Image (cartoon, rainbow, N blue to C red):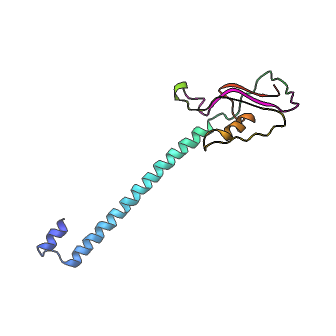
């Protein structure tokens, strides 16, 4: 504004006005870079904190001290009133139940297809069967 005023009164030439604008751009460009750098540093600090939180998670499923030996003959699979949440470490009211009260039975030798929308729990059912996760409630039985 000051350079514009001086130029309109004739106290500043066009060349001086351009030089003044170039000085301003040379001052503000590094400040913009510092703002971008600061934003990048803050985002990386958040990412590091999330990685450290992930490293603190105990990924091992606790084993029963007295396990029952498996007696699989025909491989009949039964889900009895199975409920599951990925958020088992959160308070009960904060948990989002992914599978709630699921019950079905697959006879030995039978082929079954599980269909549904994305996010409806199809893959989770298989992960529960292989015990990649522990269920919240219910039972998963193989040959009883």
Residue 85 is a magenta residue: yes
Q: Residue 112 in magenta? A: no
Residue occupying the point 74% across, 34% down: 129
Q: Is residue 101 left or right of residue 44?
A: right
Q: Nearer the viewer, residue 73 or 58?
A: 73
Residue at 81% x, 37% y: name it. Answer: 110
- Tell me which corner region of the image, top left, top right, bottom left or bottom right, holds residue 88: top right
Up/down of 48 relative to 86, above or below: below
Q: Position of residue 97 (x, y in %)?
A: 58, 31
Give 54 or 33, whichever is nearer the viewer: 54
Q: How many marks?
A: 0
Q: Which residues are magenta?
A: 71-90
Q: Position of residue 80 (x, y in %)?
A: 71, 26
Residue at point 40%, 60% (across, down)? 33
Residue 139 coordinates in the image, percent (x, y): 72, 25
* Residue under the point 81% across and 32% down: 107
92 above or below 111? above
User: Taking 104 as reference, is 6 above or below it?
Assistant: below
Picture quarter with the C terminus: top right
């Amino acid at each position: 504004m000051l350079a514009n005023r001086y130029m309109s009164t004739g106290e500043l030439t066009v060349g001086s006005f351009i030089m003044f604008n170039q000085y301003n751009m040379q001052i503000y460009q590094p400040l913009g870079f510092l703002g971008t750098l600061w934003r990048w540093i803050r985002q990386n600090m958040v990412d590091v904190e999330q990685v450290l939180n992930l490293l603190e998670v105990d990924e091992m499923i606790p084993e029963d001290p007295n396990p029952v030996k498996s007696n699989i003959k025909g491989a009949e699979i039964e889900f009895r009133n199975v409920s599951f949440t990925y958020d088992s470490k959160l308070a009960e009211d904060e948990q989002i139940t992914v599978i709630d009260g699921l019950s079905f039975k697959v006879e030995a030798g039978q082929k079954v297809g599980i269909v549904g929308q994305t996010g409806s729990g199809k893959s989770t059912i298989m992960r529960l069967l292989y015990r990649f996760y522990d269920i919240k409630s219910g039972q998963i039985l193989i040959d009883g």
